[in-house]
Image (cartoon, rainbow, N blue to C red):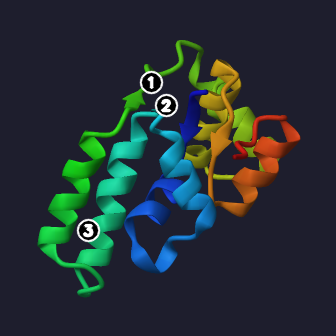
Amino acid sequence: MSFVLDASATLSWLLDDERDDLAVTALRALRKSTAIVPSLWRWEIQNALLVAERPGRIDIELVNTLLADLDRLPIVIAEPPTISLAGGEVPFARRYDVSAYDAAYLELSFRTGLPLMTRDGKLSAAASDLGLLWSP
C-alpha cells in the first residue's frame, strides 16, 4: 500500500544516529509500495543533509550518495493541490498547531487518503486524529 512520507521519516533512514526499527520497517515497505511526497520534501531533505554536512556530522561524499540512493527509490512527488491557498494547508496548520510545511504532509495524506509515515510527534498525533497514521 502506498503512503505519504515526510522528511523526518526519510531522514531517520539516512542518518545513522536517527535510525530505529520503525524507520527500517518503513524503508522496507517501499519494496512493495510507493511513497508520495509534497514538492517541498526534496528541499527539506537537501537542506537537512547540508545542515548535517556543514559541521562534519556527515561528509560530502555521503550526502551525494544518499541523494543518489533516494533518487532510485519509488518516491513520487505529488502535484500541488488545486484548492486555494486559504483552503489547503492553513486549516490543518491551525487545527493541529503545526507549521504550514508540516501541514503540507497532512493535506496530501488527507487529499489522497493515504497514511502518513512520520517521526514527528505533532504530525503523528494529527495523522492519528485523522485516522491516517501509517503503521507497519
Residue type at tag 3: Leu
According to the picture, the residue beneath numbered tag 1 turns out to be: 78
Pointer 3 or 2: first along the chain: 2
| Helix, strand or loop status at disc 1 | loop
According to the picture, the residue beneath numbered tag 2 turns out to be: 36
Q: Is residue 6 left or right of residue 126?
A: left
Q: Tell me the quadrant of the picture where the N terminus can be found.
A: top right
Name the residue nearer the viewer: 130 or 29: 29
Name the residue nearer the viewer: 20 or 56: 20
Q: Is residue 16 left or right of residue 115?
A: left
Q: Which mark is residue 64?
A: none
Residue type at tag 2: Ile
Where residue 86 sits in the image (x, y, percent)?
65, 26
Where residue 109 sits in the image (x, y, percent)?
65, 30
Q: Residues within 10 Å of mark 3 (few under 14, many from 20)?
A: some
Asked whether the residues under the numbered discs 1 and 2 touch, taking CB atoms below 8 Å apart as contact, a structural biologist would say yes
Where residue 61 sits in the image (x, y, percent)?
12, 70
Q: Is residue 115 left or right of residue 84?
A: right
According to the picture, the residue beneath numbered tag 3 turns out to be: 50
Q: Is residue 97 visible?
A: no
Residue 90's place in the image compared with 16, above or below, is: above
Where residue 91 sits in the image (x, y, percent)?
74, 33
Q: Residues within 10 Å of mark 2 (few under 14, many from 20)?
A: many
Q: Nearer the viewer, mark 1 or mark 2?
A: 2
Residue drawn at x 57%, y 70% is 20
